[in-house]
Amino acid sequence: MLRPTLNELISGMQRTIMEAMLPELTSPYAQGQAMSTIGMLAHAAASLDRAPAYDAAEIKDLRATFAALKRLGDKHISKKSGLRGALARAIRAGAKNPPDRRAMEAAMAAFATAVALGHADDGVARHVRAYLRRNLERTLALLGSPLIP
Amino acid sequence: MDQHRLTEYLKRRMPHAREHRVVGLKRISGGSSRETYAFDLEWSEDGRTHTRPMIGRRDPTGGLLKTDREREFKVIAAMHRAGLKVPEPLFLELDASVMDRPFFIMHRAAGRTGMGAFPATEPESTRAKVADDFLSELALMQSLDYRECGLEILGAPKNPEDPARIQAAHWSEVYERDRMGEHYPILTAALAWLVANPVVTDRVVIVHGDWRSGNYLYDDNGIIAMLDWEMAHLGDPMEDLGWASMMFWGRDELAGGLMEREAFYRLYEQKTGYRVDRKRLFFYQVLGNAKMAVICLSGIRDFVEGRTSDAVMPFLELLIPQLFKDLANQLRLV
């Protein structure tokens, strides 16, 4: 492996700001910006470590959720709801290589909207809510760190 | 802001005074929607030397909000005339050639402030005084006739359902503009719910638009000045109450970190003489979470696209999961 690694570079940048630049800054505003930049680099390092697993879990869960919704069958997804088209697009997006996560999330937005507006069948709503709960848990685990300046 | 240009500008605006000196000019954090500078102005007049602490707020190159500084200045001036606790507005300059971008100057009030919920470390007596002032000032603002204040410029809603519709439509539009092609299912659903379920107001009042802990200066005797008037508009009184009492700006059961929510609503009713309409309050709490999430996305977009270099902007991403969680709970999406 070539050294320094990306994480080692980020740690080095943090030290450079902290030890070489910050002591020379006299403006409190500039000092605050420097401290935020150090935090931003910590956030970047954490993202590098955790984002790939987060992305993989999201795609897997979206695929599984849309597959489950498809298994429910047409009687649970009325034609006029417009959700059949969204489901078809999501299934196609999930089958692409690489999967089109944005298109799957667009379809999930349509399903979540139907749930919020009370337009979704109970079976559909159960799958959508379960996905959104898992998605929130993953997002909070990824970003819910005490890094807020 | 440039010290020399600022001094020359103040000389022109204060021709009766002599020997103007701008002292200690420095950029400060806070008020993320505009660049904020603190300085003292010294001058001679009537054979005496005067000093006044001032704040300069200059339009940003990018940032959290795109708002009109003339409108903000006029609102602060109207609130100052009406006796609200606000910083005294002094000069408005719309000519961008003076200091690169439009700006205005206000008196710099003393006092402390926080980022969000009222600090738990403050003494109980201070918290009680701030909580009381927070709702007294809100009640005073909501009692004002916007026409008598000269604030028709904010655009009076024509129908009682307009305030909710206008806000839902506005933040949906900003979301579409600033989501950078991403889809956020919970936020999309929340905005659709807001558009589909507008509430009807019982009266039209001046709405601050960001009435919350973190947006006032205070000391041990209570609130000194309410800040950040750039989102002011005319609308439903429940909008500011809903925003102020959102979980996001509070701490546990304390609205704004100030007071237990039900007691907060009761005190609001005492101060205003109006009942808290729970349906409208709920609508505006949902709107508040959606609006804050959209504001975060706007700040992130400006950072990503290079319109601001403010290092705080990327951290807005970290605020979004909590807002989504609150929205999902409110709309039973989880």
Image (spheres, coloured by chain):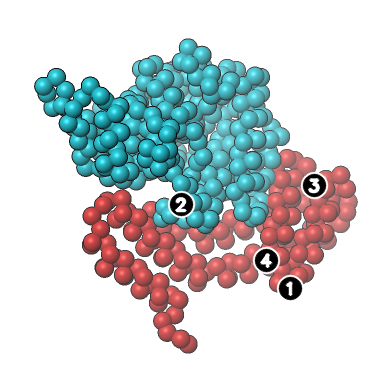
Chain colours: A red, B cyan
Cα distance, mark 3 to mark 2?
Answer: 45 Å
Give the residue pinned by disc 2. Answer: B308
* Kind of element beneath mark 4: helix
Q: Which chain carries label 4?
A: A
Please say if the residues under marks 1 and 3 sit with CB atoms less than 8 Å apart. Answer: no
Who's the residue at 64% across and 40% down the image? B173
Cα distance, mark 1 to mark 2?
Answer: 36 Å
Please say if the residues under marks 4 and 3 sit with CB atoms less than 8 Å apart. Answer: no
Q: Is residue B254 visible?
A: no
Q: Closer to the N terminus: mark 4 or mark 3?
A: 4
* Kind of element beneath mark 3: loop
Q: Is residue B203 left or right of residue B113?
A: right
**Amino acid type of disc 3?**
Asp
Q: Name above or below for residue B61 compared with residue A3.
A: above
* Dot label at residue A51: none
Badges 2 and 4, same chain: no
Camera-nearest label, 4 or 3? 4
Q: Total marks drawn?
A: 4
Camera-nearest label, 1 or 3? 1
Provide residue B234's location: percent of width, then percent of height: 54, 23
Give the residue pinned by disc 3. Answer: A121
Provide residue B9's location: percent of width, then percent of height: 30, 33
Cα distance, mark 4 to mark 3?
Answer: 24 Å
**Amino acid type of disc 2?**
Thr
* Dot label at residue A97: 1
Which image quadrant for residue A98?
Answer: bottom right
Camera-nearest label, 2 or 4? 2
Q: In this view, does B48 lie to the left or right of B265?
A: left
Q: Mark 1 lies on which chain?
A: A
Badges 1 and 4, same chain: yes
* Kind of element beneath mark 1: loop
Badges 3 and 2, same chain: no
